[in-house]
Image: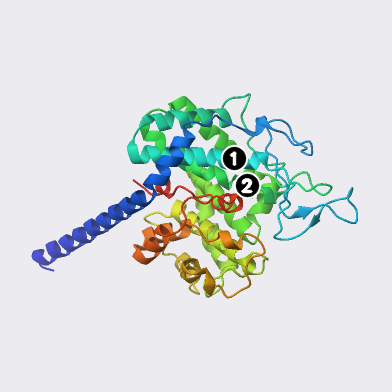
Amino acid sequence: MKRTGILGLLLVGCLALSLRSLGNNDFKQQVAATLRQSILKEAAWALKQKPITVTAERCPRSAGGKHDFYSEGDYWWPDEKNLAGPYIQKDGLTNPQNFTAHRLAMIRLSRIVGALASAYRLTHEKRYVRQALIHLKTWFVNPETLINPNLQYAQAIKGVATGRGIGIIDTIQLMEVVKGVEAMQASGVIGDADLMDIKNWFNQYLGWLTTHQYGKDEMNAKNNHGTCWVMQAACFALFTGNNEVANFCRNRYKEVLLRTQMAADGSFPLELKRTKPYGYSIFNLDAMATICQLLSTKNDNLWIYETPDGRSIKKGIAYLYPYLKDKNKWPLQPDVMHWDSWPVAQPALVFGAAAYQNSEWLNTWKAMEHEPTNEEIIRNLPVRHPLIWLNN
């Protein structure tokens, strides 16, 4: 090939990279502009909040101690025929008498750190980081108030189990805590010793997730619980530098999650069988998209990965997108609970829009609700601050 031909190809390649970079920068600017007002409002609230950890309240039904996270199975109720006996299941119907204080405290932490980290990314003001550090040290460093790095007593069932692997889904709330720390590291406010202590807590928790039987049970769950195990393990592995677990999660996404959970049309049959098929389909799609956002690399891009028979995250988003844009087109019965509250600004859309530079998906996401108030929706929306998930 002539020298001029080679130079021409190089120039075209450089121009393509430049255009892509400009596109990515423009995309992030649009996301930041969409979220700016809500971020600064929530961060102003977060600046006034004092830390509340699991040590602030304890349920008498918990088999754990003061520092142990405790929650109860959502869909388990007293047996009307035997009120003193074990609880019975009512799928999709949440028991309002369940103990939720620890779960709400963890969601609150996630919201506080996510908002403060997002505000720091927008403004570079260190006061946001200083406030976040107070909460981080209270939860993960201070021996008087920290949470134990396990979930042995999560989603217990009265008369049935003191804890279950299924309860591990409760710590999806800690992902934005991790992403928040990563977003704030450049500030210089979080010292090496504090960062090491925080990472040590997550390293211990990741060890429990990958070795305890509850963790193994959750990893092998065949529906959104298995997806959320991979999502969490990936997030915490990247934070703590555990490449072995991160690579395991990449392979599990490709070899297990896509192949066993997604149908050829991009739907999730196991979620469609539930009494809340719409909400569960959204939740599982968000989790899979978050896995792709976390684990994609230049040499192993999960956004473009397809199984041999064509299943992919792009197909999953494309399947659900028409029903996110217009819920009235949903072909199944409405969910038994919270039907009116879905959808909101789903992370699958904004992450997918970024990955594929899809302006239609981005514009739909922009027009969605960015400040949901329904507690169930908030709990099932662990990515509430997408700005800290997008690379600088």
The answer to which of 89 and 16 lies nearer the viewer is: 89
Residue 195 visible in the displayed image: no
Q: Residue at x 50, y 74 (%)?
A: 309
- Element type at marker 2? helix
- Tag 1: amino acid: Met
Q: Is residue 144 left or right of residue 84?
A: left
Question: Whole-percent x and y of residue 248?
Answer: 54, 53
Of 190 and 208, nearer the camera is 190
Specify the amino acid type for callout 2.
Asp
On the rendered structure, is 183 left or right of 20? right
Q: Position of residue 300 (x, y in %)?
A: 42, 57
Percent x, y for residue 37? 38, 45
Q: Earlier in the sequence, mark 1 or mark 2?
A: 1
Residue at image location 58% in from the left, 75% down from the top: 331
Is residue 376 in view from this perspective?
Answer: yes
Q: Which mark is residue 106?
A: 1
The residue pinned by badge 2 equals 170
Q: Is residue 318 above or below residue 233?
A: below
Q: What color scheme is it?
A: rainbow
